[in-house]
Image (cartoon, rainbow, N blue to C red):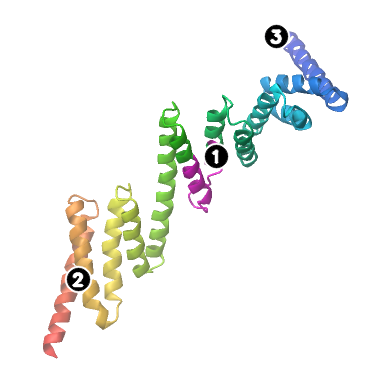
Amino acid sequence: MNSKLRQLILIFIGGLILVSCSEYSKVMKNGSNEEKKNLAIKMHSEEEYLKSVTLLEDIIPYYKLTPDGEKLYFLYCMGNYNLGDYYLAGYYFKRFIRQYPTSKNVEEATFLSALCAVKNSPDYKLDQTETLNALDELQIFIDVYPESNRIDTCNIIMDNLRSKLEKKQYENSKMYFKTENYKAAVVAFKGTLEKYPESVYKEEMMFLTVKSSYLLAINSISSKKLERLEATLKSYRTFVAEFPESEWLSEAEGIKAKTDKEISNLADTSTAK
């Protein structure tokens, strides 16, 4: 493409933008409700969502009880969704469902409302209230529309959200270990494994349970030491039975040997007394 042709194309596109902006400003300022409605629909189709939403905000109240009301409200919801304002979009999708419960768009609105909650779900390191809310909304959709062709998508998304919750709990448990709070680590690892028995972190958490149990035991007062050493052996046996070829097997066996020696020393001390 030569430079002259490119320049002509840019001038043409610039002209279209100016015409569009001029038309929008004119209709927004002095246009009738019908003109705003038609331009809002046009702007939405051209992916000018902010302009479309702004126009719709002006006229939706006037169309509430008309045949166009449902279409315009759904368009307004979609505009907010496409703008990435998921809190607002989720709120308006729910309002749409309440106002137009027999609409053909109710299923889609319910699904997209749940997706808004999914979009609001933060990184696993942050508070996961929004993630739990997203799971609830997706489950409601599945319960209400069990035959929907969106069910598989919902299940995939829910698996991803649960993985996020699982990772957060795993990282929280591991933090106790890293900060040498071994008693809390043992409780946290066991709790996580009970909640997520098929966790992708299962092998590591079971090994760290062995290690935490041992470190807790050797740092315990005399009256609790034997009980906690025996708990270490129990967690070791469970770990080895579950993962006989684990990458941590050698270290686990070293912990077992030290645990056996500690128990033997305690027995010798008790006999000597």
Q: Is residue 123 visible?
A: no
Mark 1, mark 2: which one is toward the viewer? 1
Residue 18 x/y as whole percent: 81, 20
- The amino acid type of the residue labelled 3 equals Asn
Question: Tag 2: Cα neighbours inside 10 Å, few (<14), some, or many (≥20)?
Answer: some
Task: Report how far apart the C-alphas of labels 2 and 3 lie in the structure.
Answer: 82 Å
Question: Tag 3: Cα neighbours inside 10 Å, few (<14), some, or many (≥20)?
Answer: few
Mark 2, mark 3: which one is toward the viewer? 2
- The amino acid type of the residue labelled 1 equals Lys
Per the image, the residue denoted by label 3 is 2
Q: Quadrant of the N terminus?
A: top right
Residue 211 x/y as whole percent: 28, 64
Question: Residue 182, relative to residue 272: is it above or below?
Answer: above
For the point 55% across and 39% down, the residue is 119
Per the image, the residue denoted by label 2 is 230
Magenta stretch: dominant secondary structure: helix
